[in-house]
Amino acid sequence: MRVELSVPVAADSDAEIARLVADRVPSRIAERDGTVFTDAAVAADRLGWVDLPFRAAGLLDEIEALQDRLAAEGLRSISLTGMGGSSLAPEVMATAAGVELEIVDSTDPNQVAEAIGTDLDHTVLVIASKSGTTIETDAIRRAFAAAFGAVGIDPATRFIAITDPGTELDALAAEEGYLATFHGDPSVGGRFSALSPFGLVPAGLAGVDVRGIVDSAASIASDLALDSDENPALRFGTWLGIAHARATEKLVLADTSPALRGLGAWVEQLVAESLGKDGQGILPVVVGGPSDVGFADARADAVLAVLGSESDFGAPSGFNAVVDGDLGEQFLFWEFATAIAGYSIGVDPFDQPDVEAAKAFARAALETGTQEGEYPAFADGDVEVYGEVEATDLVGALRELFDQVDEYGYIGIQAYLDRLGEAGATDLRPLVSRHAGVQTTFGFGPRYLHSTGQYHKGGHPNGVFLQITADPRTELLVPGRGYGFAELQRAQALGDAAALREKGRPVLRVHLTDRARGLDQLRRAVSEIAPHHHYGVD
């Protein structure tokens, strides 16, 4: 694995590395010594990921045996429902390997309906939830069960569960007789679970060479445990810590290798959720490549990292990195580096104190009704605008939001849309970044709630948020619940907006009464705003 770093003042890096070497941070993490993060040693219960590559042999045999069984029964289509750490790693593995793995991690009714309508006769659904009670995963499981039942297929013969021992999902799988159940290790947190059953089972069943990924991770493990400046994870973790101390707290990620396509989304979740708390942290910004907005014209608040082969680039901040290696190396490297960065910054990388707030507000919205007391500030064409705004048109409302962001703050775009059918909405990230003049992130909801959502509420309080909702194209009931997917999706949007506002974060919600025309109108409105600060329009 090759990791190249540059820092503005090498002495800072040398001193911080020396401090962490003296504290034996890498080796203590590898030894599962939780006191490295807290005197109470509670973090010891979250360090099971460090030796996963050496505990995977039996799991790999089980995956291969089940894969043969599915093939013999003509079950060739693998779908996965899971959120955050339960879906991002297998999605990266499948993308890199060029194999089909359908990820169902949305509550958009159209996206869920499309997933269910794809080749049920040959489909297996992998249901992945560490807690066993993840609301999105449970809702999608119920919808698939109803669909299988409607065509005369016993859902249990098509369901595979991945969960921690003793959860509600574990009990349900045993009661109903699922095709297979794989147990996670309770000492492995979701975002650190790439090399656990949560990452390896779905990817392996889809046809990824997961044995090769595990072997690759194992080959680098000893290097990542070294208390030495030769340890690439130690150097990178302290690099992030030094950048953070210099108020350079945004990590802009660009992949340059097809073999690492999509890795940025996994890194985004790991870094944002692990480090974004207590008013501190590193905000990952995933861009399309080194020439994209936010990378090519980065400012002093950003560090730049290329995933893959080196490109010709340089950050005004002086913090540049190239991280080159295959997926197995990347997974374990980033896990160690993130944990080490947490130590350097002074946060516990294994908790997520601000995640529950949005869930609580969403539950309240479901109980009271998502339309209760909700009135737009105004309507403009195919867009309704919600929030405290003085403007009376969409351009003016967006301008007000952009004016609220600090010069070195950021804008978070949260799109509660169909992640596949409306994938083109992602072009709003560079467009907003150009015209607002600050780093801008983009996340589909509710997917981002299990990723950057922790940072939005717990990280640096310099973000403002543009939330996009839309009238549903269809409705799909959640069997056994008193609501449908559209209402659940709306409740999650309203819940996160309420949690953000409670934290003092500005939120503007734009609701598209016609999805296609509304998105076009939103793009035009952003383009009418004169570029701010540094970023210009090409």
Image: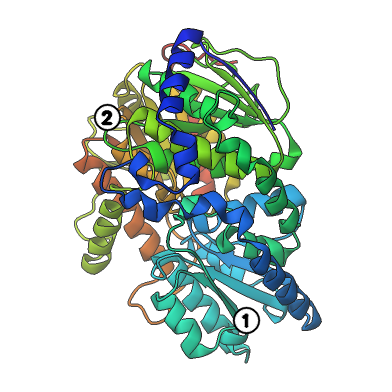
Looking at the rendered structure, which numbered label has been put on residue 71?
Answer: none
The amino acid at mark 2 is Ala
Judging by the rendered image, the residue that carries numbered circle 1 is 158
Determine if residue 442 is in view. no
Q: Quadrant of the N terminus?
A: top right
Out of 460 and 502, give the one closest to the viewer.
460
Q: Closer to the camera: disc 2 or disc 1?
A: 1
Out of 195 and 475, give the one closest to the viewer.
195
The amino acid at mark 1 is Arg
Question: Residue 317 at x, y = what percent?
Answer: 49, 12
The local crowd at label 1, few if under 14, some if 14 to 19, many if 20 or more residues have their Cα within 10 Å, is many
Out of 460 and 491, give the one closest to the viewer.
460
Residue depicted at 56% across the width and 61% down the height: 198
Q: Quadrant of the C terminus?
A: top right
Relative to 172, does residue 27 appear above or below in the rendering? above
Relative to 173, does residue 259 appear above or below in the rendering? above
Which quadrant of the figure has residue 200? bottom right
Relative to 264, does residue 395 appear above or below in the rendering? above
Question: Residue 191 at x, y = what percent?
Answer: 48, 50
Judging by the rendered image, the residue that carries numbered circle 2 is 391
Q: Is residue 220 left or right of residue 469?
A: right
Question: Residue 463 at x, y = what percent?
Answer: 33, 30
Determine if residue 192 is in view. yes
